[in-house]
Image: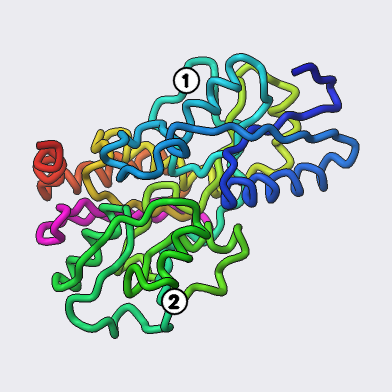
Amino acid sequence: MSRTDHTLIVGTRGSLLARSQTQWVIDRIRAAHPGLDIQTEIITTKGDREQGKPLPEVGAKGIFTIDLEAALTDGRIDIAVHSAKDLQAELTPGLEVLCYPVREDPRDAWISPTGTPFEELPPGSVVGTSSLRRQAQLLAIRPDLKFIPLRGNIDTRINKTQRGDCAGAVLALAGLRRAKLDGHMTHPFEPEVCLPAPAQGALAIEGRADDARVRAILAAIHDPATATAVECERAILAELDAGCRAPIGILARVEGDRLRCDARVIDPAGTRQVRASVDVPLADRDSAPQHILEQLRAGGAEAIIAACRV
C-alpha cells in the first residue's frame, strides 16, 4: 500500500472493541496532527478465526497479534493498535511498541442481567468467563460457583449473559468503556478481590523500530506513566513464563513520584495463592519487577505455575 509522509495506515482487528479502541487512538492522533491522512486496515487474526475454542486450547500466545505483526513487517500498515495484554513477551524482530496512550481503568467488571451484585449470587450460580485468572480469584472467595467459557466479541458476550446463559459475567471495564457498553456493568471488582491481567486497560501501539517518522507522530499521545506501569507488569510476566494456563494478576501504577505494584499467582481451583507487593521511588522503577519476583518465588509461585503446565 503506497503512502506519503502525510499518510498513516493503522492496522486493527475487526471486532467492535478493536475498532472502537482504534478509533479512540485515531481521534487523538488527528487532534495532534490535523493534516494527517489516517486510513484503517482491518486484519483478521487467529484469535478471531477460532472463537469457538477456549483460549488455552487455541494457544493464547500471539493469537491476536501475529497477523498484525506480519502486516507491519511487510509494510502493509504503519502501526498496529493492540490491547496491551494480548502482546506476547517477545515481539517480532524489527518491531517495537512505539507508544502507550493513557491507560483506561484496568479493573474487571461484573455484569448481571438482573443487576444482582456478585456478592449476592445464590449458591452454585453459573458465571461466564474464559479467563482462568478471573475464575481462580473468584473461586478463592466463592468456591461454590460454577463457570462456563464465554468467548466472542464484547457485545456477543453481553448478549449471551442477557439471554440467560449464566447468572453474570466478568469482562474488562476498559473494554466496556471503549465500546461504550459500560452501562451494562453492575459494578467493578476492586483489585483486592480480582487483580487484573498484566497490562489490562492499556493500549500498545506497535510499529517498525526504525520508523522515525511514525515514532515522532505518536510521541504526542504517549503517556510515560502508563508505559512505566505496563512495562513493569510485562517484565514480571515474562520472567514467570507462565503461558496461558497459570492464573496470574499484576497491577502496577505510578502515584506521584512512586511506583506501586501488586502481583498474585493462584492455582486454577483458587485453593492456593501467592501474593507480592512493592512500593519504590519512581527513580528505582527498574528494581520493582525483581522485588516482586523474589517474593513470588519465595512463596512458591513457580510450583503453582509448574503444576498448571501438567
Q: Residue at x 58, y 16 (%)?
A: 73
* Res. 255 in view: no
Residue 92 is labelled as 1
SS at circle 1: loop
Q: Main secondary structure of the magenta part?
A: strand
The answer to if 55 sits in the magenta stretch is no
Given the image, on which type of amino acid does mark 2 rest?
His
Q: Residues within 10 Å of mark 2 (few under 14, many from 20)?
A: some
Residue interval drawn in magenta: 256-280
Please indicate whether residue 285 sits to the left or right of residue 203 in the image: left
Q: Amino acid at mark 1?
A: Thr
Question: Is residue 257 one of those drawn in magenta?
Answer: yes
The disc placed on residue 187 is 2
Q: Residue furthest front?
A: 163
Q: What is the number of the mark on residue 175?
A: none
Residue 276 position (above or below residue 9): below
User: In the figure, 304 relative to 277: above or below?
Assistant: above
Asked where in the image residue 124 lies, by quadrant, the reply is bottom left
CB contact under 8 Å: marks 1 and 2: no
The answer to whether residue 82 is visible is: yes
Residue 219 position within the rendered picture, expressed as x and y whole percent measured from the top left: 70, 36
Above or below, comparing residue 180 to residue 234 in the picture: below
Real-space Cα separation, disc 1 to disc 2, in angstroms: 38 Å
Task: Indicate the position of residue 159 as horizontal and vertical percent values.
Answer: 47, 65
Residue 257, percent across and down?
A: 51, 55
Counting other residues with Cα less than 10 Å from the Cα at mark 1, is it few (<14), some (14-19), or many (20 or more)?
Answer: some
Quadrant of the image containing the C terminus: top left
Earlier sequence position, callout 1 versus callout 2: 1
Q: Quadrant of residue 35?
A: top right
Per the image, label 2 sits on a secondary structure element best described as strand
- Would residue 220 appear left or right of 153 to someone viewing this image? right
Judging from the image, the colouring scheme is rainbow
